[in-house]
């Protein structure tokens, strides 16, 4: 869950909040007059993205032409 703080709370403890975002890998929202104005998010490591892509590699199935109409003989539900 993300942390929400006002500008006045953030200003004197900015480094503390930034360290928290870095360590916990969770976003921080800074508000002004109760409305969100800034969102601080941790940067994803390149390794995390590569790991995810590696897991997804070869997981896509190819079904050929998916936009052409299907003939009545091909509909299993109608049989």
Image (tube, rainbow, N blue to C red):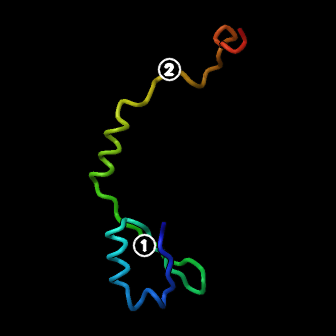
In the drawing, what numbered circle is on residue 40? 1
Apparent side of residue 67 relative to residue 64 in the rendered image (left or right): right
| Left or right side of 41 for 78 | right
Residue placed most toward the observer, 73 or 68: 73
Q: Quadrant of residue 61?
A: top left
What residue is shown with label 2? 64
Q: Nearer the viewer, mark 2 or mark 1?
A: 1
Q: Position of residue 5 (x, y in %)?
A: 49, 81
Q: Is 2 situated above or below 57?
A: below
Q: Position of residue 62 (x, y in %)?
A: 46, 24
Side (left or right) of 45 relative to 74: left
Residue visible at 59% across and 80% down? 35
Q: Residue at x 37, y 65 (%)?
A: 25
Query: Looking at the image, is mark 2 or mark 1 earlier in the sequence?
Result: 1
Would you place residue 19 above or below residue 25 in this image? below
Residue lying furthest left: 47
Mark 1 packing: few (<14 Cα in 10 Å), some, or many (20+)? some
Q: CA distance from mark 2 to mark 1?
A: 43 Å
Asked whether 76 or 63 is in front, the reply is 76
The residue positioned 60% from the left and 87% from the top of the image is: 33
- Of 27 and 58, the residue lying toward us: 27
Q: Secondary structure at mark 1?
A: strand
Q: Quadrant of residue 58?
A: top left
Q: Residue at x 71, y 8 (%)?
A: 79
Q: Position of residue 32 (x, y in %)?
A: 55, 85
The correct choice, above or below, for 43 with respect to 9 in the image is: above
Secondary structure state at the residue bearing disc 2: loop
Location of residue 28 with respect to 71 vertically, above or below: below
Q: On the image, which quarter does residue 14 sit in? A: bottom left
């Amino acid at each position: 869950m993300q942390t929400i703080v006002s500008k006045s709370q953030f200003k004197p403890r900015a480094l503390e909040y930034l360290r928290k975002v870095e360590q916990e890998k969770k976003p921080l929202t800074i508000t002004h007059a109760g409305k969100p104005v800034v969102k601080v998010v941790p940067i994803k490591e390149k390794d995390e993205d590569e790991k995810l892509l590696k897991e997804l590699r070869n997981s896509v199935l190819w079904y050929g032409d998916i936009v052409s109409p299907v003939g009545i003989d091909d509909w299993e539900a109608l049989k």
